[in-house]
Image: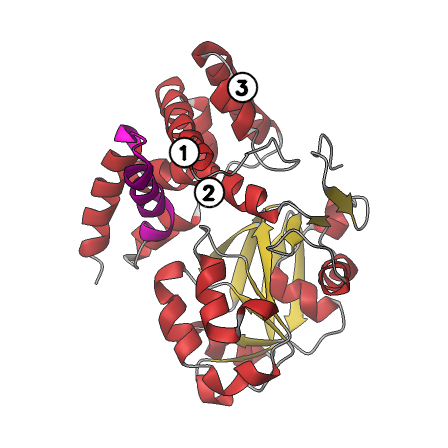
């Protein structure tokens, strides 16, 4: 169940049982009865074409989900709704290859990491089409055409200017219809920044150590580093004028940042124990996946963005700066 949500949100539907929740956006929109096109890397797209479906392994269940996939942008047809899921270093190339479809776009949404994603999408399709979004769904591409779903969670949606509108409700309803819980909020900027602050340590530490996510939280030395990095990010968000919250289904970054160091460490360690108890011991975060495959890291969108904002506001971010330098060095070898 979703709980302890701040004011300014409304649930489109109560969160469902795990069986209904489990899934990925490609499966979700297909299950919702939509005609879904996927622009993917060639190897992945060919595997989907060969079977006519993508295979989803999700907490003991398996789906073969019909899906149209291609690696050639010119074969993608105009669409009313565009969902951007690329790694952030691939955003310019992906959007530049799809200029022929943007006139038809009515809703453009990015579930990518970071907060600059909305501006990049607005530059492509126009600010009026962009809806803010955050996803708490994890997955690993195990092989071309085969995806393992590793983490359940809702999708937060909202107008970037804080207004309300039917199109956000409609998009949320589509996700719910396909099996994913959705939360509509008039404070999507706070949600995006809250996730960014949480993502800074939860992407950096696994990528630099090679550890699963639960191992970061169950190891006291690393859990304390998580706390330190969250506190730095929280200070940057405050300087940006964004009030972070303990959003339901997101880690309580506000509490972590404002609690005593020992209390914050205890919360982080408790989270690690919950991951283990829930059997969520195979979460390979996206940045670690990229590092293992020697693909470009999202370091500029996450750690780099926080470091630059900290410098701009005179907020020290020594731990984040160190992570940024290490990750940038790793990233430079993946070109």
Q: Nearer the viewer, residue 10 or 270?
A: 10
Q: Are marks 1 and 3 in contact (CB under 8 Å)?
A: no
Report if the CB atoms under discs 2 and 3 are less than 8 Å apart: no
Q: Nearer the viewer, mark 1 or mark 3?
A: 1
Where in the figure is residue 114, as x and y percent of width and height?
44, 50
For the residues carrying marks 2 and 3, which lies nearer the camera in this image?
A: 2
User: Label 1 neighbourhood size at 10 Å, few (<14), some (14-19), many (20+)?
Assistant: many
Tell me, yes or no, whether the highlighted magenta stretch contains residue 312.
yes
From the image, tell me which residue sits under label 2: 196
Q: Are marks 1 and 2 in contact (CB under 8 Å)?
A: yes
The label shown at residue 233 is 1
Q: Is residue 144 visible?
A: no
Work out whether residue 66 can be spotted.
yes
x 76%, y 36%: residue: 1
In the figure, residue 77 lies in which quadrant? bottom right
Q: Is residue 234 left or right of residue 126?
A: left
Is 22 placed above or below 75 here?
above
Rendered image coloring scheme: secondary structure
- Looking at the image, the residue that sits furthest to the right is 13
Residue depicted at 64% across the width and 47% down the height? 59
Of callouts 2 and 3, which one flags the residue occurring earlier in the amino acid sequence? Answer: 2
From the image, tell me which residue sits under label 3.
267
Secondary structure of the residue carrying numbered label 1: helix
- The stretch of residues the image draws in magenta is 298-319
């Amino acid at each position: 169940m979703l709980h302890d949500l701040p004011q300014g949100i409304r649930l489109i539907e109560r969160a469902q049982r795990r069986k209904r929740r489990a899934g990925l956006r490609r499966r979700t929109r297909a299950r919702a009865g939509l005609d879904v096109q996927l622009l993917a890397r060639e190897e992945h797209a060919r595997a989907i074409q060969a079977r006519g479906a993508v295979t989803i392994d999700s907490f003991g269940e398996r789906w073969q989900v019909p899906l149209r996939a291609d690696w050639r942008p010119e074969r993608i047809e105009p669409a009313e709704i565009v969902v951007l899921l690329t790694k952030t270093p691939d955003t310019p190339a992906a959007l530049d290859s799809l200029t022929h479809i943007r006139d038809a776009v009515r809703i453009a949404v990015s579930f990518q990491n970071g907060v600059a994603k909305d501006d990049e999408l607005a530059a492509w399709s126009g600010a009026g089409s962009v809806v803010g979004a955050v996803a708490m769904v994890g997955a690993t591409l195990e092989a071309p055409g085969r995806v393992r779903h590793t983490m359940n969670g809702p999708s937060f949606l909202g107008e970037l200017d804080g207004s309300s509108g039917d199109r956000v409700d409609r998009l949320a309803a589509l996700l719910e219809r396909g099996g994913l819980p959705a939360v509509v909020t008039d404070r999507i900027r706070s949600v995006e920044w809250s996730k960014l602050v949480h993502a800074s340590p939860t992407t950096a530490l696994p990528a630099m150590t090679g550890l699963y996510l639960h191992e970061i939280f169950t190891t006291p030395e690393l859990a304390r580093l998580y706390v330190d990095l969250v506190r730095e990010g929280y200070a940057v968000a405050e300087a940006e004028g964004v009030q972070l919250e303990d959003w339901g289904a997101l880690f309580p970054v506000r509490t972590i940042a404002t609690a005593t160091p020992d209390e914050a460490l205890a919360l982080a360690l408790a989270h690690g124990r919950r991951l283990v108890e829930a059997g969520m011991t195979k979460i390979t975060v996206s940045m670690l996946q990229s590092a293992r495959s020697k693909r470009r890291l999202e370091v500029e969108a996450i750690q780099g963005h926080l470091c630059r904002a900290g410098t701009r506001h005179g907020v020290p971010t020594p731990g984040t700066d160190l992570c940024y330098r290490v990750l940038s060095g790793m990233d430079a070898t993946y070109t």
